[in-house]
Amino acid sequence: MVLGALGVVFGDIGTSPLYALQTVFSIDNGAVQPVPGDVYGVISLVFWSILLIVSVKYVVFVMRADNDGEGGIMAVAALIRRRVSGQRRLVAVAMLLGVVGASLFFGDSVITPAISVLSAVEGIEVVSPDVRSAILPIGVAILVVLFLVQRFGTQRVGRLFGPVMLLWFLTLAALGVPQILTQPGVLRGLSPTYAIAFFADHPYLGFIAMGAVVLAITGAEALYADMGHFGRPPIRGAWFAVVFPALTLNYLGQAALILRQPNAVHNPFYLLAPGWAQIPLIVLATFATVIASQAVISGAYSVTRQAIRLGFLPRLAVRHTSQQESGQIYVPAVNWLLLGGVLVLTVTFGSSAALATAYGLAVTGTLVLTTTLFLVLAGAAWHWPPWRLVAIGIVFGGLELVFFAANLTKVVRGGWLPLLLGALVVLIMLVWRRGHRVITARRIDIEGGLSEFVEQLRQRPLIRVPGVAVFPHPTKETVPLALRANAEFNEVVHEHVVIVSVISENVPHVPTSERFDVDALSYSDDGIVHLAVRLGFHDDQNIPAALRDAFMLTSELETDPDTAYYFLSRITIELGDATDMPTWQKRLFIGLSHNAASSATYFRLPADRTVVMGTRIEL
């Protein structure tokens, strides 16, 4: 699991030594000088940013806010909704911040693969300048292959990528140590006093430099979002045992090289290696930077499923790719949408340098929002004392606000792109949430009360045909439309009727023994029962499997799921004259509903025993 985490979780942050220091020393045409004061100041900023934001904030503090093993900003928002349910306004604000943070993460998920792969392929130009025209086609081909292999699952991808990334981190450390030994004074840069002095001597330059220093911590949010794929212990172990020491040694090595050879600022990473090792290093770096995009891709799957279960996105097909780890998933629709967006960006911008102008704003925005939600959770649910919340807010939140403000300078040069992507995702989530509430209210009016329907059946007995009919339905308060249609138009009811309601809880997992609640609906002799299935947003919503478990665990359910027929009520939504929503929102909601996965697919119903009956509702 540690090896797999190395291959999936740490690719983004692990490849930052390729460009972080080089970018810092290139801002404003070399405004940061390769002199001891500036070098010590920069390396101090980099080291303490990694230490505070990644090691302390995420690995030590934020990863405590796991929603039964699930991580990511939406998981924190869901945890707040579950633990602070009495404060509705606070919960509403937390969920909105979670939606915004998740949307910014999606924006980062489109940019990171494009910039990572392009920066990797552009390294080939160092070896052979003649291949410059082939860089873009090669990058596109690599991206296509990367997204094609996602269907095999993060565990298999991690097994493939893990050994490569382990070699990469060992190489980072091996490159840095000799330079440190020749220039041991560089260890002074580990003192925070040099970062403070750098800001004191160059306030404006220090502020601008923070926009480049943040490149050293990109991937921190993906580390948290991927927690559900591998769990907290493997990620923590890999970070402290391998990743953090390797990054520190390499950054110190680059700083030592710059102190000894000031002209090395143009490419301090590759100049760490002797001439004979530079070509193999470029090849290894190419693989590592391609792998870097895996962290945000896997994180995007996790965030998508959380948003679906929390009601902010339509149902999408989610495939589980591991028999042992339920968090390892693959979402085909998200995979292909990400691929399309990444390819558009790659072709449009054409180079990693052009994409760099748009990079960083989404990352830092998500960092700030995660800190905000963590403080809300710690104060309202964990009841931490105010002094601790203030201290954490000043240390982490203050540093991240500086990062965010420094990256705001990139807005007019391309930073608008992640903001636009994030705004579009926020719009989609909020419109879907609102439209779903309106449609649910309309559907309840059409379906009618279930208890009254059962009473009518007893007063007007219908033909009871042999067999078991299962009706997936969101509530036991109303009648499934398919059941009503069978009774009113076909004048038949099956001998055994099971109305199944899948209830998504605000936790990732619900134990099997606590999932089921059987209700005979006032009469135990009519063969009609309601089964409530409580599932977490991380559990597989498989109704036949749930029926098998319920059949084994509860004596009240006289149903053999292997012979049951499933009747689905499909609703076609049409544009109407109601004033609940603006027309443009209605059109967007209808478009989203048309692209949602069918209930038969989502609930894993057997195709040969599933009947779909439909109706129309105007929005």
Image: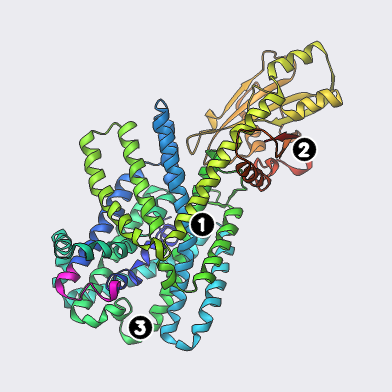
The three-letter code of the residue at mark 1 reads Thr
Q: Residue furthest top?
A: 459
Which mark is on residue 154? 1
Q: Which kind of residue does numbered mark 2 sit on? A: Val
Query: Which residue is pictured at 61% across the width and 54% down the height?
Result: 333
Q: Nearer the viewer, mark 2 or mark 3?
A: 2
Which label is found at residue 277? 3
Q: Which residues are magenta?
A: 27-40
Give the mark nearest the N terminus, 1 or 3. Answer: 1
* Residue in front for this viewpoint, 498 or 308: 308
Residue nearest the viewer, comparing 134 with 607: 134
Vertical placement of residue 263 versus 309, above or below: below
Quadrant assignment for the C terminus: top right
Q: Position of residue 118 (x, y in %)?
A: 47, 72
Identify which amino acid the numbered label 3 is placed on.
Answer: Ala
Local crowd size for mark 2, using a 10 Å CA cut-off: few (<14), some (14–19), many (≥20) = few
Q: Give how far apart the Cα atoms at labels 1 and 3 are.
A: 31 Å
Label 2, label 3: how far apart the Cα atoms are: 63 Å
- Identify the residue under disc 2: 612
Query: Which of the 4 image quadrants contains residue 373?
Result: top left
